[in-house]
Amino acid sequence: MIIEPKVKGFICTTAHPLGCAENVSRQIQYVKEHSKIAGPKNVLVIGCSTGYGLSSRITAAFGCQASTLGIMFEKPATEKRTATPGWYNTAALESMASAEGLYARTINNDAFAPNVKQEAIDIIRKDLGQVDMVIYSIAAPRRTAPDGVTYHSTLKTTSESYTNKSWNLVDDTIYQVTINPASEEEVLATQKVMGGEDWKDWITALSSAGVLAPGALTIAYSYIGPEVTHPIYFNGTIGMAKRHLHKTAEEITKEFQETGIQAYVSVNKALVTQASSAIPIVPLYIALLYKVMKAKGLHEGCIEQMQRMFQEKIFGNDGIILDNNRLIRMDDYEMSLDVQEEVKRNWDIVCSDNLKELGDTTGYWDDFYNMFGFYLENIDYSQDVPMM
């Protein structure tokens, strides 16, 4: 069938298999254009199919020549609808890895479930022996904990209502949005979903089973951002969960010190992802940020961030580079003073009339559609393709 993008709010309900494969191919090519990385040999990527997780897996496989096992939760195609982009991304990655003799296997199931952890352990034991790196990159709306309770995450403030500018993605207007505070139960539930509890459960399960190599490295992903997004992000329900994630890194390192396992959190740059598109205020900030960073030659997408993290921040000659809070700062370009000062100036004056002048709205939408495999060069979208 001929597959076209169908957008509802902040999500695209279709994905293009050839476009997704092209997206993966471009990321692989980018990694290959850089020198080989003296990194891990066997890598588990929990949340491997889109965004930073996908780019991490690509960098590990094609930059480090590592064997990779991925965990994803994606939907295959049916007669009436396409597969999710993560499904197509992973099919393409596995095919391209196999063509180069690289091991790449994927479990498609709920990463929060204990039986999935056991399935991963069994595969690692049989195929790899042990993994020496674990990437944790999950952004989920809900989680069923081991005790059977299902928790739902929320996008709210934690103290008082917050009102600021936001970008209406439907009609390209700037309007005022108010985000209301969460209850204590909602704060806790968001922490249960997006905090470090499941990350630690994974490391505990892998270590107890003997499939986590001594001295293994594990990294989870986070975001801090500028002051304008702090009420909804850094100081909001998501931010509280991320702080729990940061604390968990210290707990893992301390509790597994006898085996030398090191856990860190990488604070990454703001990018267009399925998760960030859903957060009020953030899309406008991203559009303004893109405009400034591209003008300064500092813009990076997921693959540029992950390739630089692997090669310079983790496996470089200087070892792991951390800030005073024991965080890997991949948002260093974004949070540089000159970038933030210019973004702040533009934020103060942006309105519906000058949005396209001050913000990179085209770049935002390009990234959005590219996530789902659309509007990529070299793809003939008029051709009839199987949904697979």
Image (cartoon, rainbow, N blue to C red):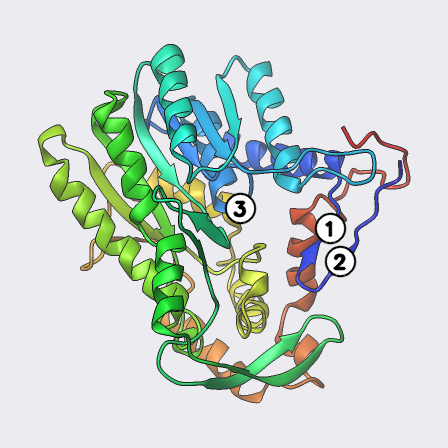
Dot 3: element: helix
Dot 2: element: strand
* Residue 110 image offset from top left, x and y in percent: 49, 37
Identify the mark nearer the N-term, 1 or 2.
2
Q: Mark 1–mark 2 contact, CB under 8 Å?
A: yes
Quarter of the rendering occupied by the N terminus: top right
Residue displayed at 73% across by 39% down: 19
Residue displayed at 68% across by 33% down: 76
Question: Mark 1 — residue?
Answer: 13
How packed mark 3 is, by other alpha carbons closer than 10 Å (few <14, some 14-19, many 20 or more), is: many
Q: Mark 3–mark 1 contact, CB under 8 Å?
A: no
Please tell me whether residue 115 is drawn above or below residue 278 in the rendered image: above
Identify the mark nearer the N-term, 3 or 1.
1
Question: Mark 3 — residue?
Answer: 51
Amino acid type at image mark 2: Val
In the foreground, 1 or 161: 161
Residue displayed at 42% across by 36% down: 113
Count numbered badges in the picture: 3
* Residue 283 image offset from top left, x and y in percent: 58, 68
Of the residues tagged 3 and 2, which is closer to the observer? 2
The image quadrant of residue 237 is: bottom left
Q: How far apart are the alpha carbons under marks 3 and 2?
A: 19 Å
Amino acid type at image mark 1: Thr
* Residue 350 image offset from top left, x and y in percent: 60, 84
How packed mark 2 is, by other alpha carbons closer than 10 Å (few <14, some 14-19, many 20 or more), is: few
How packed mark 1 is, by other alpha carbons closer than 10 Å (few <14, some 14-19, many 20 or more), is: some
Question: Mark 2 — residue?
Answer: 7
Left of 330 or right of it: where is 7?
Answer: right
Dot 1: element: loop
Of the residues tagged 3 and 1, which is closer to the observer? 1
* Residue 374 image offset from top left, x and y in percent: 75, 47
